[in-house]
Amino acid sequence: MVTTRICEQLGCANPVFGFSMELEVAIAVSRSGGVGIWGCTRRTPEEIESGVSHMKAELGDLPWGVDLVIPAGMPESDDRAAIEATLPAEHVAFVDAMRERHGVPDDGLPGMRSRFVRSEETARDQLAVVMDHQMPVLALGVGSPTWAVEQAHERGSLIVSLVGRPAHAESAIRAGADILVAQGTDSGGHTGPIGTFTLVPLVVEVAGGRPVLAAGGVATGRHIAASLALGADGVWIGTAFLASREAAPEPVLLEKLLAAGVTDTVISRSVSGKTFRMLRSAWSDEWAADGAPEPLKMPHQDILIGDLLGQVLRHQVAPLVHEGAGQGVAHLVAQESVATIMDRLVAEAERVLGSLGG
């Protein structure tokens, strides 16, 4: 097996952290020898309670964790009306026109991004539920506030902080992070401007001996071997599981994921207000077009587009369907089980390391 000190620390067979917004993917990663991380930041406290309870029941002593996003500068309260009252008329008109151009039905329901406001209140309510369950890992995808880190440590959880710059790593260390994820610009979702091969060694240098995971474009066993050669103790993978059977993407999205090449992703602020790598689609093209307004800051962009985006997905309006995805999406060629993907990743990493004498 490909083992590092991460395996000794967490009791996993392989140093592969598998991130997914889909609960069953995270569970399958842990069952396959890795560490499954459920991204639940867009879930209500009640949904988080149900999901975490399910993970604990399914996984027993296997390592697992959840990922929350707690960015700085969010409003104090979960008050959608207050946010809506400040949305610029130009932006509202642009979104309404996009709906009309693409024939998106208005079913009157919110999307995942507009069911509640990303706020201090929301973050504390979500964390309170998470802290009720003793878990091996709490990952913080954006932001590492000291109050959250301290609560997690009090309950015996390791803090994993995702960072996109050495300065971010230093801030996370000061906040108390135990494990750093060096997330290169190749990554899907919220990502920065520094490439993985440049970033990982820089984060290792400032980590002070803390384990570092490599993220961004890690989609094959060769990438795992390369990450270890860069000084990482393991990898953080998300895109490789997007088309898995457990993820169960809708047919329109599955087709786009399997057809995508390395140039078919784009970094845009049009989803959350923060830089976000995703599949290129009519959605990103509309926001990048001449005359389009600049996306708003988080959480205002969430509320501006959340209902429309939810309706795009529910009604499968194909041109606008997209997903957060890294450049590793080019390696997706078929729908497979998480176990099959994990087996291939580990076997290839072992072959490469063996050929190098590692």
Image (cartoon, helix red, strand yellow):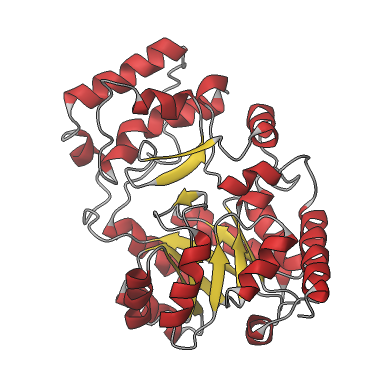
Q: Determine the residue positioned at 23% across, 53% down.
A: 77
Q: Quadrant for the N terminus, please.
A: bottom right
Residue 345 percent location from the top left of the image: 76, 61
Residue 197 percent location from the top left of the image: 53, 63
Q: Is residue 276 left or right of residue 256?
A: left
Q: Residue furthest front?
A: 356
Determine if residue 109 is in view: no
Depth check, front residue: 133 or 92: 92
Q: Is residue 117 left or right of residue 156?
A: left
Q: Count the marks: how many? A: 0
Residue 295 percent location from the top left of the image: 28, 35
Q: Determine the residue positioned at 37% across, 71% down.
A: 166
User: Is 313 situated above or below 76?
Assistant: above
Residue 352 image-quadrant placement: bottom right
Determine if residue 13 is in view: yes
Residue 339 percent location from the top left of the image: 80, 58
Depth check, front residue: 15 or 35: 15
Q: Quadrant for the C terminus, please.
A: bottom right
Q: Is residue 73 left or right of residue 60?
A: left
User: Is 285 situated above or below 267?
Assistant: above
Q: Determine the residue positioned at 54% across, 38% down.
A: 323
Depth check, front residue: 86 or 352: 352
User: Is 167 situated above or below 306?
Assistant: below
Residue 13 image-quadrant placement: bottom right
